[in-house]
Image (spheres, rainbow, N blue to C red):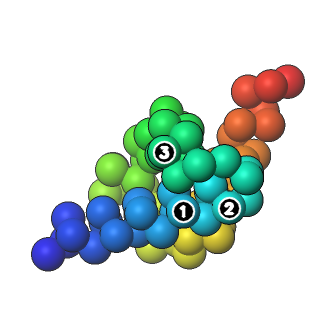
Amino acid sequence: MKDYLLWRKFARVILLLAERLDVSPERAMGIFYGTRTCRWLHDPEMQLHNMGDAYLVDDIIRELQDMQM
């Protein structure tokens, strides 16, 4: 059950990321799975799964902006 909830969170974050970046969900999925935020979401010790979807998308966007600098 726990994995199912995490997968649903991933889906929500990916769809919100696609909307915010104005890209396809497939492109957003590729972006999402390449981020530190995604790696941390898989780590139960980070407790990132408790954060809201919008917070996670904001974190991903900040991470992408930092990579461009």
* In contact (CB < 8 Å): disc 3 and disc 2: no
Q: Image quadrant of residue 53? A: bottom right
Disc 2 marks which residue?
A: 19
Packing grade of label 1 (10 A; few <14, some 14-19, many >=20) is: many
Q: In the rendering, at what x and y percent does residue 22 appear? A: 73, 53
The secondary element bearing badge 3 is classed as helix
Q: CA distance from mark 3 to mark 2?
A: 12 Å
Residue under numbered circle 1: 15
Q: Secondary structure at mark 1?
A: helix
Contact flag, marks 2 and 1 (Cβ < 8 Å):
yes
On the image, the x and y values in percent for residue 16 come to: 61, 65
Q: Is residue 48 visible?
A: yes
* Residue at 71%, 37% in the rendered image: 64
Q: Is residue 55 above or below residue 36?
A: below
The percent coordinates of residue 61 (x first, y second) are 72, 48
Secondary-structure class at tag 2? helix
Q: Residue furthest front?
A: 24
What is the quadrant of residue 18 in the picture? bottom right
Q: Which residue is mark 3?
A: 26
Which amino acid type is shown beneath numbered disc 3?
Glu
Name the residue: 51% across, 57% down. 14
**C-alpha distance separating marks 2 and 1:** 6 Å
What's under tag 1, amino acid-wise? Answer: Leu
At x 41%, y 60%, the residue is 10
Q: CA distance from mark 3 to mark 1?
A: 9 Å
Say whether disc 3 or disc 2 marks the residue closer to the N-terminus: 2
| Nearer the observer, 19 or 40 | 19
Q: From where the camera sits, is residue 36 visible?
A: no
Q: Is residue 56 above or below residue 68?
A: below
**Whether residue 30 is situated above or below residue 28 in the rendered picture:** above
- Tell me which label, 3 or 1, sits earlier in the chain: 1
